Image: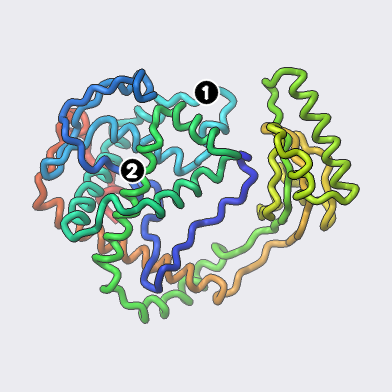
């Protein structure tokens, strides 16, 4: 269900020297690795893409490998989606994709620069033997995390289609980001002094203690009976009635598992047994936060339907985390920042000798913003 499932940050613990270094959407940008045509005509009727993307053409070349307009437009959309996976569903009306695909030339130029940089890194990864196609399991895991913001895969695919994206494009974007991350670790990790990082981490904690405050939280299970304002009246009535029946059953002692078994084929029903943890300081959750432990709520009407929640735990006051709790997180952050610094130096050197040509006249004359060219 949109906005209800807790999105825990993905933590990679393969070994002590592995850390995520792609900290923002602009750091984890995808590009198509091998496009062999300089002018590509795409039939939207055959691949489901939006009509606006029928014509594609090369806007830049990096060591004889092209970057196309479609890649740039796709990246602009994916940046928006990764920044906010539910961006399409947070607006009352249909999202105007053109707002994302056609920002200012300054924004386009900044994104093009990151595509150029990633192209250089993918070329380097290929040169040193990081196989560009052997990332299936990791790609699937990352996409599953993106899907978790939706109640089911169908809604995720509907949003992709609405944006004019193909599932394969998302897979490729994720794969390339993983490759860039792997290359960054391989190239620069061994040059970082772990002892120095461990000494700097406590100082960082003292200077940024406010960044490590755990907010008041609630932990709960929930059942959603799907119902939307534009559903037919009879369907809305059925959902309201079903929510009342299920609430009464839970209050009499039925478990979430028993409810799931009692309604195995009910399309309106979503049962989430796994405990969810969310901040309890927003208006949307006051009705849940006010419940006693193990108390079942009355049906709460939400945009997506009737929410029936059972509170499991409550932390009513914010809590300052201790340094031991966050030490690894801080060290990973410091390592990631150092990796990005070294990667930037390496990219500057690579761009000085690479054959890079920007073919789009408007983008060619648009200067890079200072945030892209300076620390």
Q: Is residue 135 left or right of residue 61?
A: right
Which of disc 2 and disc 1 is earlier in sequence? 1
Q: Nearer the viewer, residue 61 or 366?
A: 61
Q: Looking at the image, which residue is at 37% across and 43% down?
A: 171
Q: Quadrant of the C terminus?
A: bottom left
* Residue 347 in view here: no
Q: Quadrant of residue 246?
A: top right
Q: Nearer the viewer, mark 1 or mark 2?
A: 2
Q: Is residue 78 left or right of residue 310?
A: left
Would you call the spot at circle 1 few (<14 residues within 10 Å), some (14-19), or many (20 or more)?
few
Q: Is residue 278 left or right of residue 158?
A: right
Residue farthest to the right, as pictured: 252
* Residue 337 in view here: yes
Under tag 2, what secondary structure?
helix
**Compared to 73, does 6 lie above or below?**
below
Name the disc covering residue 172, or none.
Answer: 2
Name the disc covering residue 94, or none.
Answer: 1
Would you call the spot at circle 2 few (<14 residues within 10 Å), some (14-19), or many (20 or more)?
some
**Residue 207: % across, % down:** 50, 70
Q: Looking at the image, which residue is at 58% across and 38% down?
A: 152
**Residue 15: % across, % down:** 40, 72
Q: Quadrant of the N terminus?
A: top right
**Residue 164: % across, % down:** 40, 27
Under tag 1, what secondary structure?
loop
């Amino acid at each position: 269900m949109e906005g209800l499932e807790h999105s825990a940050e993905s933590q990679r613990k393969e070994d002590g020297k592995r850390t995520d270094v792609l900290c923002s959407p602009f750091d984890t940008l995808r590009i198509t690795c091998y496009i062999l045509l300089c002018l590509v005509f795409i039939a939207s009727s055959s691949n489901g893409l939006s009509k606006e993307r029928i014509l594609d053409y090369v806007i830049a070349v990096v060591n004889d490998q092209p970057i196309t307009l479609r890649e740039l437009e796709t990246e602009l959309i994916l940046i928006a989606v990764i920044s906010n996976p539910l961006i399409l569903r947070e607006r009352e009306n249909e999202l105007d994709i053109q707002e994302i695909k056609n920002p200012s030339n300054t924004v386009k130029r900044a994104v093009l620069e990151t595509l150029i940089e990633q192209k250089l890194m993918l070329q380097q990864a290929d040169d040193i033997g990081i196989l560009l196609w052997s990332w299936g399991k990791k790609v699937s895991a990352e996409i599953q995390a993106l899907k978790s913001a939706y109640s089911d895969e169908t809604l995720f695919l509907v949003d992709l289609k609405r944006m004019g994206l193909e599932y394969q494009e998302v897979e490729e974007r994720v794969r390339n980001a993983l490759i860039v991350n792997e290359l960054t670790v391989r190239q620069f990790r061994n040059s970082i002094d772990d002892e120095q990082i461990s000494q700097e981490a406590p100082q960082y904690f003292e200077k940024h203690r406010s960044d490590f405050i755990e907010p008041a939280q609630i932990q709960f299970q929930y059942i959603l009976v799907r119902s939307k304002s534009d559903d037919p009246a009879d369907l809305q009535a059925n959902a309201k009635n079903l929510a009342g029946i299920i609430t009464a059953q839970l209050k009499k002692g039925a478990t979430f598992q028993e409810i799931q078994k009692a309604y195995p084929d009910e399309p309106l029903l979503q049962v989430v047994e796994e405990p969810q943890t969310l901040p309890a300081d927003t208006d949307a959750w006051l009705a849940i936060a006010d419940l006693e432990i193990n108390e079942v709520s009355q049906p709460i009407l939400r945009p997506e339907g009737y929410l029936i929640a059972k509170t499991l735990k409550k932390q009513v006051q914010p809590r300052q985390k201790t340094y031991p709790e966050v030490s690894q997180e801080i060290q990973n952050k410091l390592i990631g920042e150092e990796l990005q610094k070294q990667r930037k130096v390496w990219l500057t050197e690579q761009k000085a000798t690479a054959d890079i040509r920007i073919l789009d006249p408007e983008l060619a004359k648009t200067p890079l913003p200072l945030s892209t060219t300076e620390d």
